[in-house]
Amino acid sequence: MNGSNGSLPPAFRDWSANVLEPARRRLPERRAAFVTASGLPVPVLSVPESLEPSYQERLGFPGEFPFTRGIRPTMYRSRLWTMRQYSGFATAAESNRRYRALLASGQDGLSVAFDLPTQLGLDSDHPLSRGEVGKVGVAIDSLADMELLFQDIPLDRVSTSMTINAPAAVLLAMYAVVGEQQGVGFRQLKGTVQNDILKEYTARGTYIFPPRPSLALAGELIAWCAAEMPGFNPISISGYHIREAGATAAQEVAFTFANAIAYVETALQRGLAIDAFAPRLSFFFNAASDFFEEIAKFRAARRIWARLVREKFRATKLESAMLRFHVQTAGHTLTAQQVDNNLGRVTLQAMAAILGGAQSLHVNAKDEALSLPTDASAETALRIQQILAFETGIADSVDPLGGSYHVEMLTDTLERAILDCMAEVERAGGALAATESGFIQRQIEESAYRQQRAIDHGERIIVGVNRFRTEVPETAPPATDPSDGRLGVDAQLERLADVRARRDSAVVGTVLGQLEGAARAGKPVMPEIVSAVRAYATVGEICAVLRSVWGEHRP
Amino acid sequence: MRGKILIAKPGLDGHDRGAKYIARCLRDDGFEVVYTGIRRTPEEIVSSAIQEDVDVIGLSILSGAHLEIFAEIFRLLKERGAGDIAVVGGGIIPEPDIITLRAAGVRAIFTPGSSLEEMLVLFRELAGETRRQRGLITS
């Protein structure tokens, strides 16, 4: 029903007067009136003519507990989701050029992909870094690289998302110090650092230290941000990679929430109050191809998280119970065969994310099963987001599928499956123990095996792969220019050697010694990491100190 | 038993969904399979291949460092007198690199379009070849 006649349920009228209207005054909608392509009115929210008591309990109104229908009263009618496309460039200088171009074209969110040596706390000149420097993102060895990465970019005016986990503390310290050099205080900085170490052991693979000290470090970073960098999301708890590794939709959310509980408990043990940091917890999920299941997953996840934070952790602030999440379309569903088909896949996946109420979105490029995307395919991915935002009308009304018998039934089903799976992790001792014992890894592996088996046996159809194949030669992955990469690596190695030669090595030795002392004593390491970064100690050197104290994880 | 395979993940990337799946399918197909886990150095991979006395090594890599790493593995295998072990690779590997790797002695490169059946067939052939060379089977 639309909101213009007199038969509105009283609860709707209350919400409209007390929640919706104040929200609209704070943040006006994008248009004075929303209409369909033929000019008919589109309501902000549709509700049944009479509301059963269970409506409020299970769905509620948008912006109200338990947030099943969305975390904001007007959702995309006021502000569209953030179109944040993640991309990696080999060198700090090249990334800097791209960032400045993006900012000039109106984007205000930057996203940093780091190369694997950086993600693993290894310097570019380490033997294990051979062939990997600048391959999947930018190489950062010392503060000098970070200075170059953000040269002439005003850090008080951008928000930066950094995909970094095991050495998150080091890279965040570098970002903070670069801000300070620009005259921007830590408190003014905005952005997100992934800092979700637990899923590295079960899904993504870039861990360094054993799970226990790593979890403690992640907790310290949450506390440090709450005190020093309150504008930063100190963690992005990620189901994306868990799903990519083979988990089902329910497992994706369940393992993510199990990890989230471990982070919350760690932060609480450090003496933080739940309402002091819960509003800053952010999440990252996957949008795969089963359209209604994905929509139901996002809606169920919001409801579960809201209840969990309020009931288990006794949060009282409304913002603490809001599940805010970024979504990326599912890389594992892209096919190398008939690559143009992937445009259809990512479009439907992106639609599921929007109908599911995501706060930000990355759409994969069609060619990502073959290589890093070309400029043209990356641009098309962004255009798909814009088509969905501006041409289809799906963003013009809040939770447009809410109330569908099918979607509500699936939302309830997903909720039960997620809660069952969370209970299993709980029985296995919680996320940390279930990660150390390999319980979560085995569950994911089993699901991955079953899914791939179904594809190989033709029980699950993938167009162009096991059905509807064309007998034309497939496109081979495009060639990369090897000389191109080599130049970047040489420059990186030179800059690293230069930093090592020019810095005050006595100071570096002292600060690294202090870091080791703090780590051995179980004291906070973040202040020491900031000092080490200021002295131009490298990511590799800082992580080597921590490795020597905490050990290395070798499953 | 059809033979013994080492599935190895060199390079720094952690994407081992494919490697684990292949390992399990090879096991289902009657092979004895050892999986190394992620982020193994060429040195570690060659040592386990020799120690485990495998017939074929399957390398899975998605980080982009395949040229450097495969070359090092071949060098070490030859240096240790284990040049008879057949090596195949899988990952997102561009066409010119496939040609380079094949010329260097990699017996096959599987890319995202490859089917499970063609992989199993090739592993059977290569394992048989190595075992015949070693006099483990005659025919």
Image (cartoon, rainbow, N blue to C red):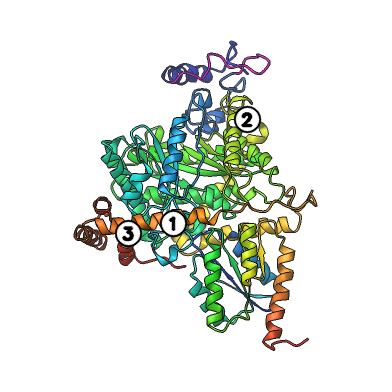
Label 2 Cα crowd, 10 Å radius (few <14 / some 14-19 / many 20+): some
Label 3 Cα crowd, 10 Å radius (few <14 / some 14-19 / many 20+): few
Question: Which residue, given by chain and number where applicable, does mark 2 sit on?
Answer: A401
Kind of element beneath mark 3: helix
Tell me if A133 is positioned left or right of A47 in this view. Answer: left
Q: Amino acid at mark 3?
A: Ala
Judging from the image, mark 1 belongs to the subunit labelled A
Question: Which residue, given by chain and number where applicable, does mark 3 sit on?
Answer: A497
How far apart, in angstroms, are the residues tagged by discs 1 and 3? 12 Å
The stretch drawn in magenta includes residue A38:
yes
**Disc on the earlier residue, 2 or 1:** 2
- The answer to whether tags 3 and 2 share a subunit is yes
How far apart, in angstroms, are the residues tagged by discs 2 and 1? 50 Å
Magenta residues, as a range? A27-42
How far apart, in angstroms, are the residues tagged by discs 3 and 2? 58 Å
For the residues carrying marks 3 and 2, which lies nearer the camera in this image? 3
The percent position of residue B51, horizontal first and vertical second, equals 54, 82
Residue A135 higher or lower than A392, as above or below = below
Q: Quadrant of residue A513?
A: bottom left
Q: Amino acid at mark 1?
A: Val
Q: Nearer the viewer, residue A351 or A446?
A: A351
Q: Quadrant of residue A523?
A: bottom left
